[in-house]
Amino acid sequence: MPDLAADWLAPQPLDTAHALPAHCYADPAFHALDREAVFARGWQLVAHAAQVLGVGDHATAQIGAVPLLLVRGDDGRLRALHNVCRHRAGPLAECDGRGAKALVCRYHGWTYALDGALRGAPDMARARDFDPAAIRLPEARVAQWQGLVFAALTATAPAFDEVVAGIDARLPQPLAQLAFDRRVSYEAACNWKVYVDNYLEGYHVPRVHPRLATVLDAAQYATHSARWHSLQSSPLADARPYGAGEALYWFLFPNTMLNVLPGRLQTNRVVPLAADRCRVDFDYYYADSVAAAQRVEDQRFSDEVQLEDIAICEAVQRALASGSYTPGRLNPHAESGVHHFHELLRAAYRAT
Ligand code: FES
Ligand SMILES: [Fe+2]
């Protein structure tokens, strides 16, 4: 267990703030702590609403180590059930699907209703005092917003409305109007927080992303922080691949990004795999008016930027693990989003 009485855990004002210590990013003990202190207590993007529109539609997901099954019940309610059978931990569903009438465990066939209540257990008549009515799948919290589905494992996560408070009014169009196009996943040899830190500032754009730098406006690049999210915004040059408008990059603590560009939403979900490894899932959504050729160009450009980010994040991870690094000063103007993230992490660690 890391030393949680250390000085660096105290809140830091932005204008004197330092980055987090290297061991937060490199020590396997923090991988375990992040799972407990951050991921078990935060909201995670787990599906898009189109996957679970009708009764019996279901989608698998995972938060930390906990497998979830999102399923719409006969009552029309969307639930996030633990995908772990109460008999001997078999899986109820191993892939997404539509219109299920019940949830049947693949191991021995115990059958649950769509609300998670056990309905039947084959050949259990000889088990004395066995009461199926007392058995149900545990339920996580679930929220549907702007066509996206989020889940949280515990009551200690904030109210979901607080997490996204103020975002709707700033959106150029309702995100639910955009249709899912495709998913691309990347693995990076860095701690998930290195990836998030990098996302949260435009300070690196001129050096790391020379082409992206010609599309964004460095002089008007702005960062605003709310309680549980931050927003980076920039006017766009009227150039390919986006055209005129605004780039809006929302970060929802702890690991969700919503990148909103004209006619386009790209969600990023950063999944820790080990202290020094993470996976990032990119889901692309478009307005019908965005043509196929534009989508291909958009995805190529995003891929180019992503590979630039992964290369710098992996170099940073190696240096953080080298033993050389002590926390450096943050740029109060350009790294306020990083500071906001670090303050939320410090608070989460203090609360354990
Ligand atoms: S583990 Fe599910 S029926 Fe046995
Ligand atoms: Fe970047």
Image: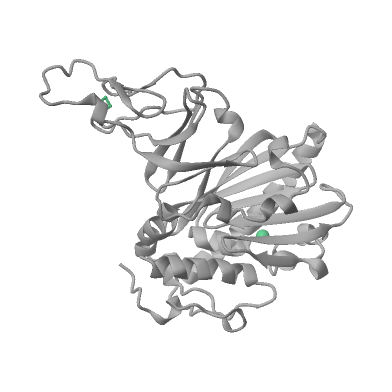
Q: Measured from the top left, where is residue 61 in percent x and y?
A: 46, 38
Q: Quadrant of the C terminus?
A: bottom left
Q: Residue furthest right?
A: 238
Report whether residue 215 is seen.
no
How is the rendered protein coloured? one colour
- Residue 137 falls in image quadrant: top left
The front one of 76 and 257 is 76
Residue 22 sits above or below residue 88 on the image: below
Q: Measured from the top left, where is residue 320 in percent x and y?
A: 48, 70
- What's the residue at 10%, 24% (across, down)? 128
Residue 14 sits above or below residue 230 on the image: below
- Residue 295 falls in image quadrant: top right
* Count of marks overlaid on the render: 0
The front one of 214 and 341 is 341
The front one of 139 and 194 is 139
- Residue 126 falls in image quadrant: top left
Q: Measured from the top left, where is residue 136 in percent x and y?
A: 31, 31
- What's the residue at 48%, 66% (across, down)? 345
Quadrant of the picture in which ligand 2 is shown = bottom right
Q: Quadrant of the N terminus?
A: bottom left
Report whether residue 196 is seen.
yes
- What's the residue at 53%, 79% (across, down)? 12
Q: Measured from the top left, where is residue 215 in percent x and y?
A: 82, 57
Instruction: Report the side of 224 relative to 117 (left or right).
Output: right
- What's the residue at 67%, 40% (across, down)? 284
Instruction: Report the side of 176 relative to 142 (left or right).
Output: right
